[in-house]
Amino acid sequence: MGIGVNQVSRRVQEWVIILVCTGALLAMAMLPEVWDNWAKQAFPGITATTYPGTSLLQLLQEHLLLVGLSSLIAVALGIGLGIYVTRPHGREYLETAHYISAIAQTFPPVAVIALAVPAVGFGYRPTILALFLYGILPVFKNTIAGLENVSPEVIEAARGLGMSPIQILKRVEVPLALNAIIAGIRTSVIINIGTATVGAAFGAGGLGAPIIAGLVRDNPALILQGAVPVALMAISADLLLAQWERSV
């Protein structure tokens, strides 16, 4: 009974944090004068306390677009590839696929974007490519781990019930591996939220724009205007996905 109460209390605390972080994020984006007033008091010697030309709301939307697209691609291909290499007809490619995906994550995101720019140009495309390469490995590895940890006895029992390989995958293996898969998705999304800030240096926009502008101008107010929303977004996303993971 005590464990159940502790779990409920923990979930309530997490939802409170999620609501507070989300509320603070929306307040920063939709009430720029609040941030401006606070920044002027915190940094009285600085005149430019907000990123010029583009509102924080638009920067937030650009950041969400970068993270959302790259994460969707990474999740779709990571899960699909993980399922394929754990099937009998694809198991011979398991080591190769794992090796390639591991190498992809060793490249710094700045280097990946710089190499992609000549091929696809500046903007969101090279950034999404870099985020995809960084985000696919956790999903891929966790999908394999989850599927490989399904008990062979359970699979044999499903065969004994007359299930086809597709039915076994959909009704037995994936549901049992779902917790591990969600953990990989959680890691991937959090990585992408932070890494997406690098794309601003290549014209992708997002919350990295004020961070880079602040670094160039030695302006801590601009740096915080980009860094604080990224942190709030990462905390909210991590706790939301943790709730999903536990509910599974």
Image (spheres, rainbow, N blue to C red):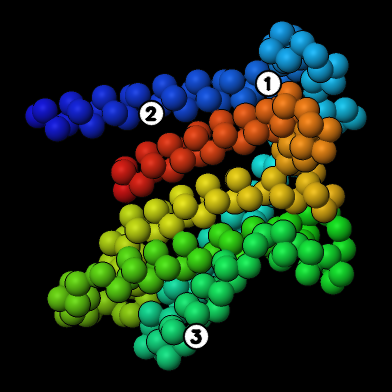
Instruction: Measure how far apart labels 3 and 1 are at the Cα level.
Output: 45 Å
Mark 1, Cα crowd under 10 Å, few <14 / some 14-19 / many 20+, is some
Give the labeled residue for mark 1. 28
Residue type indicated by callout 1:
Met
Residue 243 appears left or right of 40: left
Of the two numbered discs 2 and 3 on the same chain, state the one appearing first in sequence: 2
Of the two numbered discs 3 and 1 on the same chain, state the one appearing first in sequence: 1
Q: Is residue 7 visible?
A: yes
Nearer to us in this view, 95 or 44: 44
Give the labeled residue for mark 3. 96
**Residue under the point 59% across and 71% down:** 104
Of the two numbered discs 2 and 1 on the same chain, state the one appearing first in sequence: 2
Q: Secondary structure at mark 1?
A: helix
**Residue under the point 26% across and 70% down:** 149
Q: Secondary structure at mark 2?
A: helix
Looking at the image, is 203 positioned above or below residue 234?
below
Give the labeled residue for mark 2. 14
| CB atoms of marks 2 and 1 within 8 Å | no
Residue 62 appears left or right of 149: right
Instruction: Measure how far apart labels 2 and 1 are at the Cα level.
Output: 21 Å
Residue type indicated by callout 3:
Thr
List x then y, in percent, for residue 176: 28, 62
**Quarter-wise, where is residue 54 in the image?**
top right
Looking at the image, is 30 positioned above or below residue 134?
above
**Quarter-wise, where is residue 164 in the image?**
bottom left
**Residue under the point 39% across and 42% down:** 242
**Residue under the point 83% across and 33% down:** 217
List x then y, in percent, for residue 3: 14, 32
Looking at the image, is 238 positioned above or below residue 24?
below
**Quarter-wise, where is residue 214 in the image?**
top right
List x then y, in percent, for residue 155: 22, 76
